[in-house]
Image: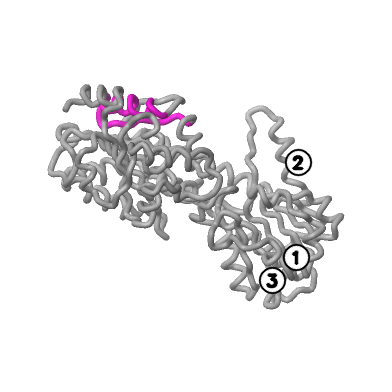
Amino acid sequence: MSLVELQTKIERQTAVLGVIGLGYVGLPVACAFSANGFQVIGVDIKVDRVALINSGDCPIDGEEPGLAELLKQAVDTKRFYATTDYTALSQADVVLIDVETPVNEKHEPEYHALRSVCASLGPVLKTDALVIIESTIAPGTMDRLVRPALEESSRGKANIDFYLGVCPERVMPGKLLANLRAMSRVCGGYSVETSAVMMALYRQIVAADLDAADCVTAELVKTGENAYRDVNIAFANELALICQVTGGDFLRVRELVNKSPGRNVLFAGAGVGGHCIPKDPWLLAFGGGNQIPIRLIPAARAVNDAMPLHIADMTRNALIRRGCTLKSSRVAVMGYAYLENSDDIRNSPSAVLVARLQEWGVTVVIHDPYVAEFKMSWPSCWHNSDALVIMVAHQEYKTLELARLRKEMRTPILVDGRRVLDAVKARMEGFDYIGIGRGEAGEERVVDSR
């Protein structure tokens, strides 16, 4: 089957699609294509996830508008099913790969899942099938890893026996389906013709721009855009830290800076989490190898990684000012997901905060309405606590009853790592309110906790 014939099958929605990895990216992609009339086969190594999907139950918690309904429709119409068996993909005309691509402690990519997928897919890959990597990968990974691995496992040649491209995803929890449709995509193919077929495919579910490119350009664009955001978040965070020690208010400073043309200071916060931003800048840096000195990306990562530790210092200092002994203190941490209204705990800043507080001997209680492990009742979370720390801007936390909190907490300390509460109202209720980026007459000065 030629690329022209494959494009015709795609446009007629008779092409069979395979999706490997049914997580935050792969599942909505599979459901979206299924809703547009395609037969979709999903593959995942997690047996329990496969069982949930095949029963029509969405394995992703949190606020994901439309996803549960779309999944049920896809399963009920029998246009989508999941399996752990790669042999089911032998009938797929197009295979999308959506697996995690983390970095290790040395900030180098770990492609265990990607290598495993290539090894398992190759032997069952249909002749003339199109394989598209949607995972975010370091520039050059298609040439260095994916193409050689698939050629070895399939015993075929790219652009002869199968076709290959990369089209990095651009979704985030809470907006998976919306982002999938509304965000532009870069279709990087190993040939101009492959890119054209990829654009025909994604036009079925994407309403935004589709741009043809080569593989390296597509890799660079995705890692570059997330590194750009990380650097900008780091600037906002560092500006907030300066506001604290100088007595300024970051939110007011940000508002006035952004009135100047061309300025767009982002929000500061308690840390940067998730699967993408903490590691994609390192993937971009890795693509440069040792040929150029990388300075800005590591500096931004250091600033953002330190933010939950700064929240820990803020909490410690507030407790000590109130005369609390750290080893007898009880702290309620509100939010464990990395993102508001989501259950995604990958690279959770709260995990870093909790670990530091526990190192100091603090008793920590965690609440998160979207993470199963931490769905406790509200009163049991903050009852008799000496400090309440807001780490995630979940909708529920924006309407906390401050008067009730004041009555039930042992020590009235509020540490707002996301600036979701009104400082004036909190102080009127008798709280010591400490907000990220809000300096008050030196109250954020570091004190000795020994």
Q: Cα distance, mark 2 to mark 1?
A: 23 Å
Residue at 63% x, 34% y: name it: 264
Q: Mark 3 = which residue?
A: 330
* Residue bearing the label numbered 1: 318
Q: Earlier in the sequence, mark 3 or mark 1?
A: 1
Q: Position of residue 188 (x, y in %)?
A: 33, 32
Q: Mark 2 or mark 3, which is nearer to you?
A: 3
Tag 1: residue type?
Ala
> In the rendered structure, which disc, 2 or 3, sits on the residue that comes first in sequence?
2
Q: What stretch of residues is rendered in magenta?
A: 183-205
Tell me the SS state at disc 1.
helix
Residue bearing mark 2: 252
Residue 220 pos. (x, y %): 39, 37
Rendered position, 242 above or below 76: below
Residue 299 appears in the figure? no
Q: Are there few (<14), some (14-19), or many (20+) residues within 10 Å of tag 2? A: few
Tell me where residue 17 appears, x and y as whole percent: 29, 36
Q: Is residue 413 above or below residue 362?
A: above
Q: Within the image, what quadrant is residue 15 found in?
A: top left
- Which is nearer the eye, 95 or 119? 95
